[in-house]
Image (spheres, grey):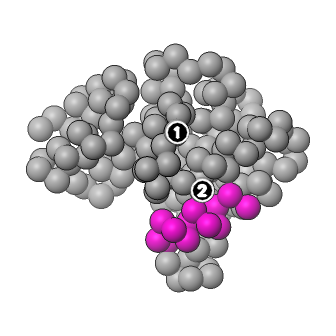
Amino acid sequence: MNKLTAKVIKKFIEYYEGDNLRVNHALKVYGFAASIGALEGLEEDELLCLEIAAVLHDIGIKLSEIKYNSAAGNYQELEGPPEARKLLEEFRLDEKLVERVCYLIGHHHSYSYIDGLDFQILIEADFLVNIFENNLKGEAIQPLKNKYFKTDSGKMYFDTLYII
Ligand SMILES: [Fe+2]
């Protein structure tokens, strides 16, 4: 694991202190995203961006629940990027990297905005975890594969984990 990713995970766990559900979700999505990203041949800087975005992708939920009493995707997308920016500030990262991370966080429920392999992999990783966490099975998940999985590695994980 990249040292920066480790530090971001630490900050994220502090941010969601006591909320094991959110922390475990983020770590699972990170694991799938990092693996798929590496298997699909992302460059090192792209992989780092994907890893950070995967850890932080649901950071907007906390404020959404406080402000709107809802974790709906549109609220998360609105509240997430400024929170991610604050969390990342101390690392003095390249602005392009922060911007991309914020874009991914701010659109991760808006599938029509997928504009790159990093984005695509984040979506696949989130689905791989959400299918498990929501206990979806059989006919409920088959359309998800066709609709949202594009990479060979993501499809391979889908087939291996969710044998239909
Ligand atoms: Fe998620």
> Circles 1 and 2: CB distance less than 8 Å?
no
Residue 48 placement: quadrant: top right
Instruction: Tell me, yes or no, whether the highlighted magenta stretch contains residue 74.
Output: yes
Q: Is residue 16 left or right of residue 87?
A: left
**Residue at screen point 56% across, 77% down:** 65
Q: In which quarter of the image is residue 45?
A: top right
Query: Could you say which is closer to the camera, residue 141 or residue 12?
Result: 141
- State left or right for residue 76 relative to residue 129: right
Figure quadrant of the C terminus:
top left
- Quarter the N terminus occupies: top right
Pick the residue in front: 36 or 28. Answer: 36
Residue 24 visible here: no
Q: Classify mark 2: helix, strand or loop.
A: helix
Q: What secondary structure is the magenta-colored segment mainly?
A: helix
Give the magenta-colored segment's residue range: 71-82
Q: Which residue is drawn at 33% across and 42% down?
A: 148
Frontmost of labels 1 and 2 is 1
Residue occupying the point 50% across, 31% down: 117
User: What residue did someone put label 1 on?
Assistant: 115
The reply to whether residue 80 is visible in this rendering is yes
Amino acid type, label 1: Asp
- The picture places residue 111, in percent across and down from the top left corner, at 43, 50
Q: Left or right of 2: which side holds 106?
A: left
Query: Is 138 covered by the magenta stretch?
Result: no
Residue on which disc 2 sits: 106
Percent across and percent down for residue 120 are 46, 37
Instruction: Name the secondary structure under disc 1.
Output: loop
First of labels 1, 2 by sequence position: 2
Which residue is found at the position 75% from the left and 44% from the top? 98
Determine crowd level at label 2: few under 14, some 14-19, many 20+ residues with C-alpha closer than 10 A: many
Residue 130 at x, y = what percent?
36, 52
Q: Mark 2: which amino acid?
A: Gly
